[in-house]
Amino acid sequence: MTALTATYVGRFAPSPTGPLHAGSLVAALASWLDARAHGGQWQVRIEDVDTPRCIPGATEHILLQLAACELHSDGPILYQSARGAHYQAALDSLVAQGLAYPCACSRKEIESAQSQQPARHTAAVYPGTCLPAPYGPGLQGKPARAWRLNIRAVQQLKSLPTLTEWGDEALGPQQQNVAQEVGDFVLRRADGLWAYQLAVVVDDALQGVTHVVRGADLSDNTARQILLQLALGLPTPHYRHTPLVFAADGEKLSKQNGAQALDVSQPLSALNAAAAHLGLPAQSGTPRQALSAWTMLWHRI
């Protein structure tokens, strides 16, 4: 795994579970503008590690949508589906340090162990049932299903505080007690697929990402990713989380709730809508001219 450089490197990392929608373009535009305003590079990564949810042809559709809006990757497209050996190496490193352990629990067992139902759209906190000694009883003869990060072991080995703190360039100072609010989170799933948290940390390091600009719905992942970066000896990028786009019913616009595919038949119109959500004025001319104008205005917002 490569270390980050002093040069600005940003990225946009869509999942090919469907085409881009209006909210996706806001995140893509914000990350592109932040990179250009800092004289940096903008990389595109296809996060297709969750293969059962990926839709055939979605990757090609996404890349065509970005190209129509003149948003082009500055380097080769990285595909997570081809990166399994790197994720395994990261997991092996954590296991060798005593920072990851096998877990036999099913989702139903985890949920039934909760004293109260988790909030809507949130997962149940893992109670530490399979924590190995000296933290817990271990598997107790049950077959392993998944692999989890041992948060307390990471904090003890790295002399970290209970609260993980960071500064978000849009949201300000942030903090989270990951052990209490999330629990030891999954690195490799019971179905053998790699978990998002591990994959994104390993890939950000490989691509030399120095700045992560993404939607505010992903802000809650940041503390987990920082812990993983520290556990693996990887630098932590700067984070900036952009405002979400909401549907008429008040739900976050997403592929899961039926968000319409982004119409790029008139790319300037699509870009102007995304820019307005970021507090930028509408532009005329070509998409390339609009992007240039917004780049010069970006630091003001």
Image (cartoon, grey):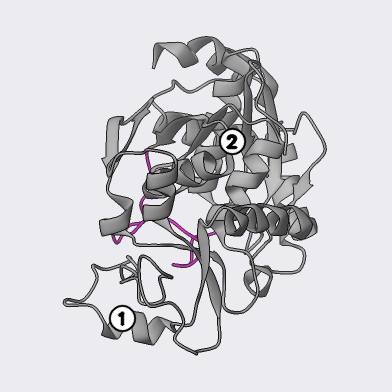
* Residue 250 on the magenta span: yes
Q: Residue at x 36, y 39 (%)?
A: 160
Quick one: SS at disc 2?
loop
Q: Is residue 104 visible?
A: yes
Q: Nearer the viewer, residue 37 or 280?
A: 37
Above or below, 170 relative to 244: above
Q: Residue 217 appears at what percent x and percent y?
A: 39, 49
The local crowd at label 2, few if under 14, some if 14 to 19, many if 20 or more residues have their Cα within 10 Å, is many
Above or below, 27 relative to 56: above
The local crowd at label 1, few if under 14, some if 14 to 19, many if 20 or more residues have their Cα within 10 Å, is some
Q: Amino acid at mark 2?
A: Leu
Q: Nearer the viewer, residue 190 or 7?
A: 190
Separation of disc 1 and disc 2 at Cα? 32 Å
The answer to whether marks 1 and 2 mark residues whose Cβ atoms lie closer than 8 Å is no
Q: Residue 292 appears at what percent x and percent y?
A: 63, 15
Q: Residue at x 65, y 37 (%)?
A: 205
Q: Residue at x 79, y 43 (%)?
A: 77
Quadrant placement of the N terminus: top right
Q: Main secondary structure of the magenta part?
A: loop
Q: Which residue is mark 1?
A: 111
Left or right: residue 195 versus residue 134 is right
Q: Residue at x 55, y 41 (%)?
A: 25
**Disc number for residue 234:** 2
Q: Earlier in the sequence, mark 1 or mark 2?
A: 1
Q: Residue 177 appears at what percent x and percent y?
A: 27, 49
Q: Amino acid at mark 1?
A: Glu
Magenta extent: 243-261
